[in-house]
Image (cartoon, rainbow, N blue to C red):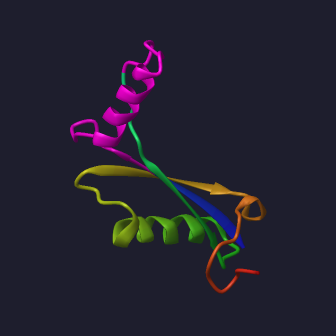
Amino acid sequence: MIGVRIRTMPKRAVLDPQGEAVVRGLRMLGHDVVRDARVGRVVELVLDLDDEADALAAAERMCADLLVNDVVEYGEVELVDASAIVVGVGAGASA
């Protein structure tokens, strides 16, 4: 099994209302040094594959098919230790 971490972030040309809210909130709390913020998301997957090249290719296809809206965001794929990923729902989940 191979772990994959996919980070998505809004493109710079796209408005980021969540990032703007973070900046406003932190400034209201006295953190005046905050100039800008972008808010993205992280998706971690455990793939039932043994080959790293196959895992990267599969993750990139998943990004193109569902996980990344390339009109407004970009994604980065990284291989990670599968044992470090907390299992949630799915066939591999345990109670």
In this view, the residue farthest toward the bottom is: 91
In what quadrant of the picture does the C terminus appear? Answer: bottom right
In this rendering, the answer to whether 58 lies above or below 32 is below
Total tally of numbered discs in the picture: 0
What is the x, y in percent for residue 8?
A: 42, 51
53 relative position to 83: left or right: left
In this rendering, the answer to whether 78 lies above or below 17 is below
User: Residue drawn 78% across and 64% down?
Assistant: 83
What is the x, y in percent for residue 46?
A: 65, 70
- Residue 15 colored magenta? yes
Q: State the extent of the magenta-drawn residues as a range.
A: 8-35
User: Residue drawn 60% across and 61% down?
Assistant: 4
Residue placed most toward the observer, 73 or 50: 73
- Residue 25 colored magenta? yes
What is the x, y in percent for residue 71?
A: 22, 55
Residue placed most toward the observer, 41 or 7: 41
Q: Quadrant of residue 3?
A: bottom right
44 relative position to 7: left or right: right
50 relative position to 15: left or right: right
